[in-house]
């Protein structure tokens, strides 16, 4: 059985739990799959974590799990073995074969510390063999300290450790040949330098004994050393996620934890091996928020698409309910404005039953018409045939549904009774289909008919063309307003008297 989640978090350490809390609080169906081996499990106390100083790291995770559970987050013990891209979802396969799918995945699997190959070191990891002076330095201050270098970078660690004690020995074999300046600086602060490789470390009655290859022995109370960070991301190999060049090749992410794949986020040590608990916590929290924000955007896009489909179906119903909707005659204002333009290619957006498009084709234009109603498109094609002109009518939602650019893009009375009709967006899309040197012509109802004394609520939005021009927000360096005016058109009112309608005319020329 496959479980479907909004988000699956792989790794339930500090970063994963912080992401989980944000997602749970955002009411996202979230699963945390955790192999249960946090990096700091070797240490009994943690430091440098404001408000939790000295706490057992396992206790903080326990509290974190309980908090996340309180917001509906679910947990599974196990190890993720494979991620598969299924387009809108990611398939998450565990080592035991269990399968989940999610709209987004957060990788918070941390790192493994690959310790220097020195017998006795691993047994003391997290106790007297320490990785970070900030996390565990205070507790061993003023005692006999050692630094086992793993690279030239370790000399920086030796500087930090010297801040804690006057009695510091640095084993520099892995940093040889030693940078002279660094050696001078260490010696100036009384740090002993031992260049021979370390052969072993063993517990003594008091502290540790470090033995070199040459047989020299040093009694110390604690050793600082950096394990090389190892990332195990074999489960995500097929995604070829971008890495950075930092030690361990961690995953490259932005501020919100986004990796190079839009549905995969990451946080914590897997993106920053140097990150301590507070940093991993902050990054996890941002990744949780990042996933929620991405899902919110997807949800809104899907809702907009569903509304558009509903609206388009309503248009189709409206056309299908009548034999013929419009007169088939060109709009007088359109004809008047277009006559002044040299014929070329044209796109009629919202072509309806084809009146304007067929007229354009009869006047030398090569025309494509697009409309959301299949019935309208069918009728328009028949109408073009009857008039002996060739027009390419298609079903589509606005200019965005059409490829290429045109010398003229026309929208005539692109209005709707729906309060959320995206007229300005449709006009912007139409503008994006105008070729350099071409025109966008929008003819609209600029005011309600004079015989309607009070417009009903939700009446189509009718704006003056200069208002629409401002709302379009087109680049004035690119667009020249050739006509921005209201024209009165003579009509017969429903009571048979003469009246006029105000047509808004917006003719914009694209300069480049
Ligand atoms: C000895 C030691 C002591 C430390 N002490 C301190 C300290 O005092 N203060 C401090 O601020 N920082 C300390 N740190 C650093 C701290 O451990 C990290 O900052 C922190 O663990 C990073 O959290 P994370 O969530 O990124 O990774 P982790 O805490 O390592 O959590 C990763 C989780 O993912 C799980 N996982 C891995 N692969 C999979 C998989 N394929 N499927 C499912 N789950 C998986 C792991 O089992 C683990 O539970 C210490 C580190 C060490 C090594």
Image: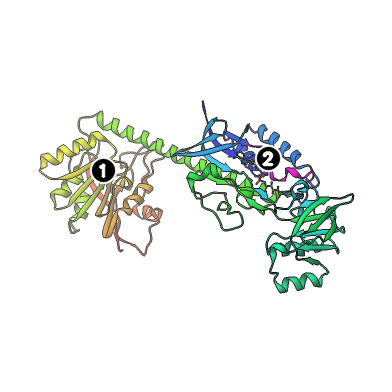
Check if residue 43 falls in the magenta segment: yes
Residue labelled with disc 1: 370
Instruction: Report the side of 38 relative to 259 (left or right).
Output: right
Instruction: Report the side of 198 relative to 401 (left or right).
Output: right
Residue labelled with disc 2: 37
Graded by Cα atoms within 10 Å as few (under 14), some (14 to 19) or many (20 or more), the crowding at tag 1 reads many
Residue 310 vertical placement versus 446 (above, below): above
- Foreground tag (1 vs 2): 2
Q: Residue at x 77, y 54 (%)?
A: 200
Specify the segment rendered in magenta: 34-47
The image position of residue 317, as x and y in percent, is: 29, 30
* Disc 1 secondary structure class: strand
Residue 411 vertical placement versus 91 (above, below): below
Relative depth, front residue between 69 and 349: 69
Mark 2 residue CB less than 8 A from any atom of ligand 1: yes
The image position of residue 125, as x and y in percent, is: 76, 48
Instruction: Report the side of 439 relative to 202 (left or right).
Output: left
Please state the quadrant of the image where ligand 1 appears. top right
* Disc 2 secondary structure class: loop
- Examine the residues drawn in magenta and state their main secondary structure: loop
């Amino acid at each position: 059985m496959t479980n479907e989640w909004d988000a699956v978090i792989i790794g339930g350490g500090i970063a994963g739990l912080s992401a989980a809390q944000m997602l749970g609080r955002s009411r996202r169906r979230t699963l945390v799959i955790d192999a249960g081996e946090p990096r700091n499990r070797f240490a009994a106390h943690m430091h440098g974590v404001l408000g939790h100083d000295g706490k057992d790291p396992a206790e903080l995770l326990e509290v974190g799990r309980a908090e996340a559970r309180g917001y509906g987050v679910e947990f599974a013990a196990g190890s993720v073995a494979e991620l598969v891209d299924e387009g809108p979802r990611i398939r998450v396969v565990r080592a035991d074969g269990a399968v989940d799918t999610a709209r987004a995945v957060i990788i918070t699997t941390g790192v493994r510390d690959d310790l220097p190959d020195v017998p006795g070191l691993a047994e003391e990891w997290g106790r007297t063999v320490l990785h970070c002076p900030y996390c565990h330095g205070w507790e061993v201050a003023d005692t006999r300290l050692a630094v086992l270098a793993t690279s030239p970078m370790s000399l920086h660690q030796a500087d930090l450790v010297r801040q804690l004690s006057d009695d510091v020995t640095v084993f520099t074999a892995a940093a040889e040949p030693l940078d002279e300046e660094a050696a001078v600086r260490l010696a100036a602060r009384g740090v002993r330098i031992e260049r021979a490789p370390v052969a072993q470390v063993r517990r003594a009655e008091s502290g540790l004994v470090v033995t070199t290859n040459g047989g020299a022995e040093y009694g110390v109370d604690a050793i600082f050393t950096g394990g090389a960070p190892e990332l195990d991301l074999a489960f995500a190999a097929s995604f070829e996620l971008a890495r950075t060049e930092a030690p361990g090749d961690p995953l490259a992410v932005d501020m919100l934890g986004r990796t190079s794949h839009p549905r995969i986020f990451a946080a914590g040590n897997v993106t920053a091996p140097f990150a301590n608990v507070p940093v991993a916590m902050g990054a996890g929290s941002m990744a949780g928020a990042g996933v929620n924000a991405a899902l919110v955007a997807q949800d809104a896009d899907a809702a907009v698409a569903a509304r558009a489909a509903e609206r388009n179906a309503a248009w189709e119903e409206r056309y299908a309910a009548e034999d013929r909707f419009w007169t088939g005659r060109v709009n007088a204002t359109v004809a008047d404005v277009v006559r002044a333009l040299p014929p070329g290619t044209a796109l009629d957006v919202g072509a309806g039953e084809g009146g304007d498009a067929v007229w354009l084709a009869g006047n030398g234009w090569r025309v494509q018409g697009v409309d959301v109603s299949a019935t309208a498109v069918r009728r328009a094609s028949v109408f073009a045939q009857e008039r002996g002109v060739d027009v390419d009518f298609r079903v589509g939602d606005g200019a965005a549904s059409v490829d290429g650019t045109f010398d003229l893009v026309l929208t005539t009375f692109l209005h709707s009774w729906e309060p959320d009709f995206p007229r300005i967006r449709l006009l912007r899309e139409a503008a994006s289909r105008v070729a350099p040197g071409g025109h966008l012509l929008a003819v609209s109802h600029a005011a309600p008919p004079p015989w309607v004394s009070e417009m009903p609520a939700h009446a189509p939005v009718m704006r003056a063309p200069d208002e629409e021009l401002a709302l379009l927000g087109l680049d004035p360096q690119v667009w020249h307003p050739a006509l921005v005016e209201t024209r009165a058109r003579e009509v017969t009112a429903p009571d048979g008297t003469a009246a006029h309608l105000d047509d808004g005319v917006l003719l914009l020329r694209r300069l480049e």
